[in-house]
Image (spheres, rainbow, N blue to C red):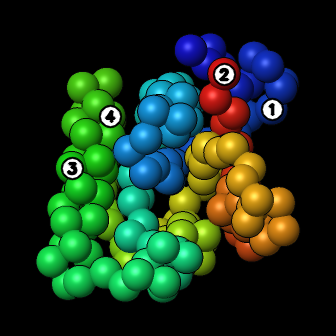
Amino acid sequence: MIESFEYFCGLTVMLDNILIATDGSDKVSVAVEHGLDLAEVFGATVHAIYVVETEAAYILTVGVSDDEMEEYREFGEEVVTDVVERAEQRGLDGVGVVKTGKISQEIVEYAHENDIDNVVVAERGRGTIEKYLGSNAEKVVRMCSKPVTVVRSP
């Protein structure tokens, strides 16, 4: 667990709103836990975001029905509800949101529109496409004017 930012850096920083991006996978669970720890240190409100990606190669090539998109949204609701409940168990306020669109763009827009002080994202494995186009974490770091914490899974 994170002890104290001031202890490590000698700075006084306040984080009131922390955004945790999640897709519900095991690889992202380390980032979710880190974001919750960080929020607990500062007593920050936890914002959990899940993005139903509409630009993914598999969606563009095979197409996805309205029912399948609704299943993705419902899964996203379950994922963010879990993060919000975990925040509340720590005595923190939590907000869960499911967006539809480009993952990195939706994360950045939410951060700017909701006075987010720090965005927490997971670094994922780099597949062939990511080697050339960049991962969502890299895009968030490049596009977001807010501080971004990238958490690597072990």
Camera-side residue of 136 and 13: 136
Q: Position of residue 137 (x, y in %)?
A: 69, 56
Asked if the residue under mark 2 is in contact with the one under mark 1, i.e. CB atoms within 8 Å, the reply is no
Identify the secondary structure beneath mark 3.
helix
For disc 2, the marked residue is 154
- Left or right, 10 with respect to 117, comes to right
Circle 4: residue type? Ala
Compared with 71, 7 (above or below) is above
Decide: marks 1, 3 in contact (CB < 8 A)? no
Tag 1: amino acid: Leu
Spatial CA span between label 2 and label 4 = 23 Å
N-terminal label among 1 and 3? 1
- Amino acid on which the number 3 mark rests in the picture: Glu
Crowd class of label 4 (few under 14; some 14 to 19; many from 20; radius 10 Å): many
Q: Residue visible at 24% across and 26% down?
A: 89
Q: Which residue is the site of mark 1?
A: 11
Looking at the image, tell me whether mark 2 or mark 4 is earlier in sequence order.
4
**Marks 3 and 2, Cα distance to the nearest angstrom?**
25 Å
Residue matched to label 3: 78
Q: Are marks 2 and 4 in contact (CB under 8 Å)?
A: no
Query: Looking at the image, is 84 positioned above or below residue 129?
Result: above
Residue 83: x and y, percent?
32, 40
